[in-house]
Amino acid sequence: FAGGGRGRSALAFDPIAPVNRLVDEFTVPQGYQWAPVIRWGDPLFSSTPAFDLAAQSPEAQAGQFGYNNDYLDILADPSGKTGVLVTNHEYVNPNIMFAPTDDPAEKQRRGDICKAAQGMAVVELRRRREGEPWQYQVDGRRNRRITVETVFELTGRAAGSDLVKTAEDPEGRWVKGTLGNCAGGTTPWGTVLSGEENFNGYFAWAADTPQQKRYSGSSTTSTETGWEAYDPRFDAHNPDFVNEPNRFGYIVEVDPEDPTSTPLKHTAMGRLKHEGANVIIAPDGRVVAYMGDDERNDYLYKFVSRDRYRGGKGHGARRKNMRLLSEGDLYVARFTGNSPVAEITGTGALPSDGRFDGIGEWVALTRDGESVVPGMSTEEVLVYTRLAADAVGATKMDRPEDVEPNPKTGKVYVALTNNSNRGSSSPVDEANPITGNRYGHVLELTETDGQAGRTFGWSILLLCGDPAVTGYTYFAGFPKELVSPISCPDNLAFDSEGNLWISTDGQPGTIGFNDGLFKVPLEGRERGHVQQFLSVPREAETCGPVIHDREGLVFVAVQHPGENGSIGAQTSLFPDYGSTAPGTAAAPRPSVVQVWSSDRRS
Ligand code: FEO
Ligand code: CA
Ligand code: CA
Ligand code: CA
């Protein structure tokens, strides 16, 4: 590995060597330290009991940090000494939270613990001086848990429609809970967006209609959390709740400043397995959001607001800006390659022009907020968005995860994590050129008609893999013998200099290394130089990277450590590692970790 060299950046580092997938350690570069900011079960309130794995209850969990943190942001206040942490709690791993049971009452109690362990968390942070690592505050003013019982307001044209009404909500405007909150994005007005991704898995699923089939394939009668056994709204076969699944699969918006505020679900941004949403302001003030539907052969989307962003962080501006994502137009991407189809062989061999690249179009699903899809009403486009995108001939992609505009350049980066079906159920194309795409790739889009416009150019930035064993890897032309191996790109972030950071989900099963976080310069001679910064423990996924390079601080959400183990047969003990101090646990705990440079100047 080529050393990054110790330049002026407060985050200079020499890349770490990749870490074998059986190693249960959190690994950082030489000269860096790490510690959890907050772990699953840490209490947010003094009235909440300390974490006790054996005595866990739904009431305790509702006041504690939740499970499987994914999206993460760390928002410092102007003083730099206080701030707030916002995270998603995407899902639960009951096999490493509980010992097995067959008792129905105990199953329901555990189901309720799981309802409280999911959702989102807002946690107050404090530190003595700007630039130092943070500590979380019990009883912080902004502390809040959002769970599967928290009420959300539906916004946009599908709110109040028949497609989202249930026996419990005949208005079709008030939804209990959020599910499968994966990645997200922080808006310029200070709110946090979160994508409801694999919501289908929480329902006993009905597959009687093409619409139901398109979101989850076949019918099911039971789920891993078991909620359908005692809470009828999770049984989509129940006529009273047949529309309950239509109330999930949205982008939600939370105001971390106001713990009493009602969070929003924005139907105008469509219903799909939303990975997340990242917002940039177009020069004319309209808000543009980029979004991926994380399923094999699903699509890339863009939302453009009708109204314009108002500057200022005051309460009034924020309240108005919180309506921007309720009215606007939804587009889906169609990619066209510029090389002969015969040159896209599925092997990763570059076409004769030397690049996988071409042009693309954002195809409208709505105009002035109204459906332009033949045969579909506006409500149907917003609730059955996948079918609308099918109808207009969008390009099937290799599982679009995070899609994020570079705040320095406006170029948009798309993490396509993998697609075992490429080349079988969908043919290879120049934007998805690898048969069975095992290691994933990253696209770079350049808007050619303005940020809010309808056309773009694109090229493949990275074809991931381990260059030592994967024949076809590509790193924007950078010498492949000098990069860190990388596989299954998932979350994206940018540092203050506009470098791309990528976190991964799936390296252990594809290249044999633990998942990690990687820096990729995008400009100049270093463009494409993938350098690994950290590695997470055994069976964990690296999520939510936050890069505060000017402070020499990096934050990640460590999700599902030890996910293949069980109580009594743990495969990870991260992050307590056998400590018996109060509040520790002999089980792996999803945690938010901060990493700092030991020679940091503050
Ligand atoms: Fe929850 Fe697409 O990762
Ligand atoms: Ca080409
Ligand atoms: Ca993800
Ligand atoms: Ca993932």
Image (tube, rainbow, N blue to C red):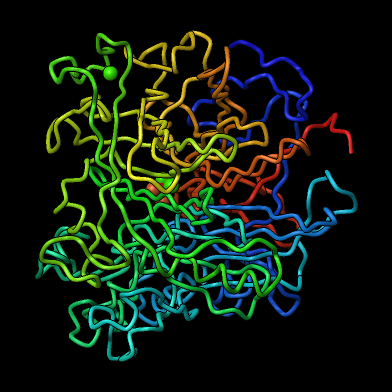
Left or right of 344 in this view: 203:
right
Q: In which quarter of the image is the N terminus?
A: top right
Q: Quadrant of residue 273?
A: bottom left
Question: Which of 237 and 477 lies nearest the eye of the viewer?
Answer: 477
Query: Residue at coordinates 26% horizontally, 68% vertically from top-left?
Result: 370
Q: Quadrant of the C terminus?
A: top right
Does residue 501 lie above or below 140 as drawn? Answer: above
Count every numbered label the image shows and give the total: 0
Question: Which of 327 and 356 lies nearest the eye of the viewer?
Answer: 327
* Residue 22 position in % (x across, y down): 49, 31
| Ligand 4 quarter of the rendering | top left
Does residue 516 lie above or below 372 as drawn? Answer: above
Q: Quadrant of residue 39?
A: bottom right
| Residue 118 visible, this orientation | no
* Residue 577 position in % (x across, y down): 65, 45
| Residue 158 visible, this orientation | yes
* Residue 589 position in % (x across, y down): 58, 53
Does residue 548 lie above or below 366 as drawn? Answer: above
Does residue 82 lie above or below 598 as drawn? Answer: below
Query: Residue at coordinates 71% horizontally, 69% vertically from top-left?
Result: 314
Question: Which of 105 and 205 lies nearest the eye of the viewer?
Answer: 205
Left or right of 376 in this view: 146:
right
> Residue placed farthest to the front in the image?
284
Query: Residue at coordinates 16% horizontally, 46% vertically from top-left?
Result: 393
* Residue 601 position in % (x across, y down): 88, 34
Left or right of 205 in this view: 182:
right
Left or right of 390 in this view: 538:
right
Query: Residue at coordinates 37% horizontally, 56% vertically from top-left?
Result: 274
